[in-house]
Image (cartoon, coloured by chain):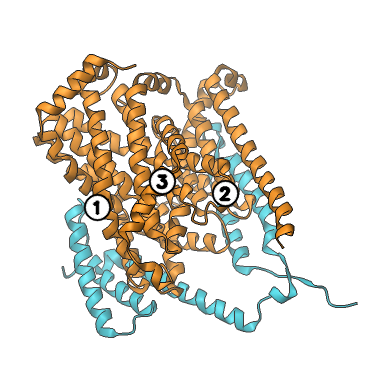
Amino acid sequence: MGEPSQRRVVIWGHLLLLCVVAVVILAYWLDARGTSLKINNLLLVQPAAIFGLILVALVLPQVFPKVPREDVPDAAQRRKELLEVGRVALLAGAFGIFVFSLETIGFDIATFVFVAVGLYLCGEKKLWVVGTYSAVFSVLVVYGYQALVPYPFPLTIL
Amino acid sequence: MLDFSALDGAYSILTSSWSAWLWLIPGLVIGLVFGAMPGISITMAMAIFLPITLYMDFLPAIVFLTSIYTGAGFGGSVPAVLMNIPGTSSAVATTFDGYPMARSGRHNQALGVALASSVMGTLSSYVLLLFLIVPVSIIVLKLGPLEMFVIAVWGLLLLGSLAGSSVWRGLLAGIFGVLLGTIGMNTAGFIRGTMGVPWLLDGIPAIPAMMGLLAASQLLNLINTTYLIENEDDRKISFAKIIDGVKLTFKSPIIIFRGATIGVVIGAIPGVGSSISNLISYSETKRNAPDGDSFGTGNPKGVIAAESANSSSEGGAMATMLALGIPGGGATAILLAAFAMHNIIGGPQFIAQNRDIVYAIIFSNFAQAILLLIVGMGFVYLAASIVRVPLRFLIPSVLVVSTFGSYAILGSLAGPITLFVFAILGWAMVRYDYPVAATVVGLLLGSLLEQNIIRTWQISRGDLGYLLERPGAILILVVMIASIAFTALSKRRRKITSSVTDPAES
C-alpha cells in the first residue's frame, strides 16, 4: 500500500481565533446570566450566545482540513509565512504602543515616533526621509484635527 | 399626490432668492472633503457648520446643510473604494466590489461608477420622494418594534448569503458582532460584559470598531505589499476612465432603480436606514445578476447597487424627517435642529402648511445631485492620486488619521483602544476567511435588535400570537424568507450550470 494522498493539518492560528471567539461568547453569556436571569436581560443575549457556540462547534472541523500531500507547506514556506506574520505583529505592536501612549507622551510626540517607526518597518530605509516625513505629517495632522474637532488633544510640544 | 399650487410656490421661492443657490457648491465641497476623511462622519461635518446657518435665512440654511449631507454621502465612498475604509456604515457594501476594483487597477472606473450611482440614486430618491412623501409617512407610522426587529434580522441574514467560502463562518461572524453590539447597558437597565470599564456602558464605540475591523486590519495586512495597485501601468489617473465608469453606470438602469427604491423605503425607517439598505440592494442585485458569482471580486454592478441605495436613503430619511419630524439618524437630527434654530418644527403640521418649502428643498436637491456629478468628478480625480503613494507612507499615515478620527468621536482613548483591538481581530478574521462586514453590521444592529425584541416582548407579553396581529411583520418575513430561498436556489443553479459547463470547457 502506498502513502495516503491526503494529510490532515492543523491551522493553529485559526484554532486560536476560534478559541478567542468561543471564550468571549461564553464569558459574556455567563456575565449576562450573573447580572440577572430576568427575561429582559437574556431575551436576545442567551439564544444568540448559544447559537454562537453551536456555530463555533460547526466551524471547528474546518480547523483540521485534509489537504493533498503536495499542498502541505514545507519548512521554507512555513518560515516565509512566519516572517510575514512577524512583520504584521511588529507593526501591530508599534500601533498598540502608539495608542496607549497618546495621552501619556502627547499626541504630537506619539504620532512622530509611530510614523517614523511605521515608515521604517514598512521599508523606508532613508533616515532623513523618515525624520522629515514624520515631523511634517505630525504637525499637519495635529493642527488639522485640532481645527476640526471640539475636543482638546493632549500635546507635549505643539 | 402632487400639489400643483405648492409646486408653483416652490418655484417662486427658489427663483426669487438666489442666496440659497450660492450655498450649493460650498456645501458639496465641504461634504466631499469631510466625508472622505476617515473618522469624520456626515453628522460631524454638519454639526461643525450648523452654527453658521444661524446667520442665514431658513432656505439657504437648509440648502447648505443638505448639500453637505449629499456631498458627504458620496465622499464616504472614496476611501471605501480606494482604501477599503467605509467613511460611514452605509458605505460598507461599496467596499465589497469597489476595493477589489481599485486593487486590480480599475480605481478610476470604480470611482466614476460610485459617483454616477450616487448622483442617480440621489436624483431618483428625490423624484420618488416628490410623489411618495405622503404615503411613506403613513407607512412609517405603522411600523412597530416587531417590524424593525424583522428588518434588522433580514439585514443580518443577508450577510450570510454575501459571505465568502463558508456559511457557518459568515453566520458566526454576524452573531459574534450582534453579541458585541449588545455589550453595555440595555434598554431595561441591565449592565453586561463591560468588565468594569465605564465607557463600555454605552456599548462598544461602533465607528472606531468599524474602522478597525475593515480598514486598520487591511492596513496591517498590506505591510508586505509596496503599492495599493501592484502593476505600475494600472496606477495611472485617467479622467477618461472616470467618465467610462460614469457611462458604465447608465447601462444598468434597473440596478439603479432597484437600489433607489430599496434606499428610499428602508432609509425612511428611523434608526435602520442606509446601513441596511446598501446591503439589501447589493444582495438583491447579486442574486438577480447572471454574473452574480463575480460579486466581491470587483464587479461594478456591486458598486452601483450599493451606492444607488445608500445615496437614495437620504431621500427616505428626509421623508421621515419632513413628514413626521422624526430624525432617522444623526444627519437628519442636525437638520431638525436647524429647523428649530429658525423656529420651525418639522412634522405633519409643517408638511401640511409649508408644502411649497418642502418642494423647494426637494428641487434644490435635484440641483445638488447634478452639481455633485461635476464637482465630484474633479474631487475623485484628485482623490485617486492616493494609489500612486507608496504603501510605506500610506500605512502609518492612515493608521494615525484613523486614530485621530476615532479619538475625535468620543474625546477619549476609548476610540483609539477600540480601533486597535478590532484591528487585530479584523486582521485575524480576514486571514482565516471570515466576512468582517458581517461582524460590522452585527455590531451596528446588536442594540437595535435587542431594543426592539424587548419592546415586542413587552407589548405582546410573550404571546407568539401577537405576530398574527402584525400583517406588516408577516409580509416582511415572507419577503425575507423568499429572498433567502431565491438566493439559495440561484446559488445552486449556478453551481449546477458551472459543473455542467466546466467539464466541457476542460
N-terminal of the pair, mark 3 or mark 2, is 3
Tag 2 near tag 1, CB within 8 Å: no
Residue B291 numbered mark, or none? 2
- Circle 3 — which element? helix
Q: Which chain is cyan?
A: A
The answer to whether residue B185 shows anywhere in this view is no
Q: Quadrant of the N terminus of chain A?
A: bottom right
Q: Residue at x 58, y 22 (%)?
A: B467
Tell me residue B33's x, y (percent): 24, 52
Residue at the extreme right of the image, as rendered:
A1
Give me the residue at 55% from left, 21% from top.
B461
Task: Depth check: give the residue in front, B387 or A84.
Answer: B387
Considering the numbered disc 2 on the image, is that residue within a helix, a strand or a loop?
A: loop
Amino acid at circle 2 = Asp
Q: Amino acid at mark 3?
A: Thr
Residue A133 lies left or right of residue A98; in this view the side is left
The picture's colour for chain B is orange
B251 to B455, vertically: above or below: below
Residue count near mark 3 (Cα–Cα under 10 Å), binned few <14, some 14–19, many ≥20: many
> Residue at point 30% right, 47% down?
B41
Question: Any mark on residue B33, and which?
Answer: 1
Q: Bin the neighbour count of mark 2 within 10 Å (Cα to Cα): few under 14, some 14-19, many 20 and up.
A: few
